[in-house]
Amino acid sequence: MKHLFAGLAAAALMAGTAAAQQSVTIGYSLSPESHYGVGAQAFIDTLTELSGGAWTGEHAPAGVLGGERDMIEGLQIGSLDLVITSTGPLGNFVPEVYALDLPFLFRDYAHARDTLDGEIGQELLARIDENNLVGLAWSENGFRHVTNSRHAVETPDDLAGLKLRTMENKVHMAAFTDMGAAPTPMAFPELFTALQQGVVDGQENPITVITASKFWEVQGYLTLTGHVYSPAVVLASPVLWEGLSEEEQGWFREAAKASGAATRAEVNRLEEAGVALLRDNGMEVITEIDKAPFAALAEKAYSVYSDQYGTEMIERIKAVQ
Ligand code: EAX
């Protein structure tokens, strides 16, 4: 009997060890099929592999834990472990990051990715770390384009009077005011219904988000304005972070890098395939416009950043080859 009990105790202990597998929750605003969903899964797979199964993760997709601003606050107080978010609301917490949100700044994907993968990206992750957040790795949302339910947009005049949802980002709001639209900041989880009910006429997002959110159901027109690059970032809660060993922190960093890479690959795929998908679903897509008049009007919005931080960072970003 004694042996039996000892055996049971040992079995219970082993079961206890297995059950001690730890899990993190990854929040994001889009569907599990989106580029963020792909990135979240790559994070989980990499973390589980590097940790030999000691760690796993769960998705909290589609804004079930709130909009991106709410989720960032959740990280700060430790109610959420990890978030994949656009930088849209991040400037409210780490103002230096607004530099990345300036309209018509990045020439193309290569320019944006090289900037984030280089010295500037590292510096900005360090700024994030100074604000009660942990910046693990850059990820990607994509170049943003304007959609609306009223008419085709080809010149800034076509934006006049359009009620356009923007992210809760003062650089973007200033840029759209200067381009002639009427910007309305709103958290992403409220957007589909707001478009459906006509609370706003339009919105702006990358092909990735427009496809993942099936905006063709509520928006007839898309113009490839590419007016701003939208970075994403994998953020951790400092509460989680401080409880990890150095080795575990290394696994989390690697997992975040793998997540960013998988998301970028999915952005590439959707940049190729997305417009056809949107057209198949009935959207009128204008692919060629003269961007110069939009850029000229949006330039004033740079002062939202430069009045406080100067133009040095802007010049450094422009100089990245
Ligand atoms: O990060 O709020 C937005 O428009 C974002 O692009 C979206 O939540 C994906």
Image (cartoon, rainbow, N blue to C red):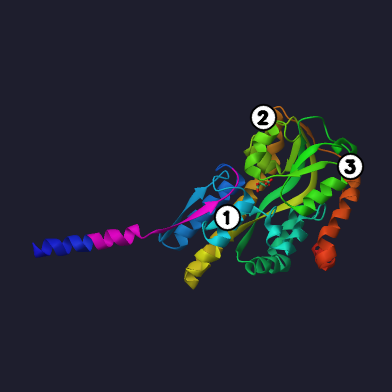
| CA neighbours of label 3 inside 10 A, class few (<14), some (14 to 19), many (20+) | few
Ranked by sequence position, the earlier of labels 2 and 3 is 2
| CA neighbours of label 1 inside 10 A, class few (<14), some (14 to 19), many (20+) | many
Near-viewer residue (292 or 176): 176
Marks 2 and 1, how far apart in space?
28 Å
Give the magenta-colored segment's residue range.
12-30
* Residue type at the position of mark 3: Asp
Q: Which residue is mark 3?
A: 290
Marks 2 and 3, how far apart in space?
27 Å
Ranked by sequence position, the earlier of labels 3 and 1 is 1
Is 21 magenta? The answer is: yes
Q: Which residue is mark 1?
A: 83
Measured as percent of width and height from the top left, residue 245 is found at 47, 71
* Residue type at the position of mark 2: Glu
Q: Which residue is mark 2?
A: 217
Of the residues tagged 2 and 3, which is closer to the observer?
2
